[in-house]
Amino acid sequence: MTSLETKIPPPLVALIFIGLIWMLSDISPIVPFDNMLRLMLSVAGLMLGFGFAISGSLSFKAAGTTINPLKPETTSFLVTSGVYRVSRNPMYVGMAFLLLAWTIYLAAPAGLLGVAGFIAYINRFQILPEEQALKVLFGAEFEAYLLSVRRWL
């Protein structure tokens, strides 16, 4: 199944899962949830999501390396500072938080299947190929980074 590896832009994958979560919310029971609390948790998830994603993007820009997830072999610099000290994949963490915020907003626990599906897809078809490319490009430096920082959080 290598035909899907680094072929679909992760933001598009997230949009697909947003739609899937919405469809799941139509067929799953809705949890009774205080509207204000639901809104506050959703906004918190959005803020966390955008914070992680934007911080990761800005770190790449500051390092002068590519942000293109479809061509990880064109990476010119291994970014390990800033938000990359907390997560090896803050942009994907950000997308997962956005999906979680959407699930909370819809008050549909079945939407958690969509969040889990996104994480599974991104792990298999995006992160693993990226890590292989980075091992080739940066060798021992990347191996040390793998041991010191978690993939997600």
Image (tube, rainbow, N blue to C red):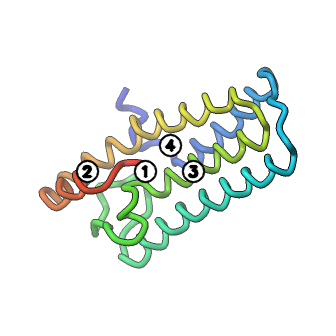
Mark 3 lies on a secondary structure that is helix
Name the residue tied to disc 1.
153
Of residues 31 and 78, the one drawn nearer to the viewer in this rendering: 31
Q: Which mark sits nearer the N-terminus, 4 or 3?
A: 4
Q: Which mark, residue 138?
A: none
State the separation of the CA atoms marked 4 and 2.
Answer: 17 Å
Circles 1, 2 touching at the beta carbon (< 8 Å): no
Mark 2 lies on a secondary structure that is helix
Q: Which mark sits nearer the N-terminus, 1 or 4?
A: 4
Q: Which mark sits nearer the N-terminus, 1 or 2?
A: 2
Q: Which mark sits nearer the N-terminus, 4 or 2?
A: 4
Circles 4, 2 touching at the beta carbon (< 8 Å): no
- Disc 4 crowd, CA 10 A, few/some/many (<14, 14-19, 20+): some
The amino acid type found where label 1 is placed reads Leu
Mark 1 vs mark 2, foreground winner is: 1
State the separation of the CA atoms marked 1 and 3.
Answer: 13 Å
The amino acid type found where label 4 is placed reads Ile
- Disc 2 crowd, CA 10 A, few/some/many (<14, 14-19, 20+): some
Residue 86 place in picture, x, y as percent: 39, 60
Q: Which mark, residue 133?
A: 2
Of residues 89 and 76, the one drawn nearer to the viewer in this rendering: 89
The amino acid type found where label 2 is placed reads Ala
Name the residue tied to disc 4.
8
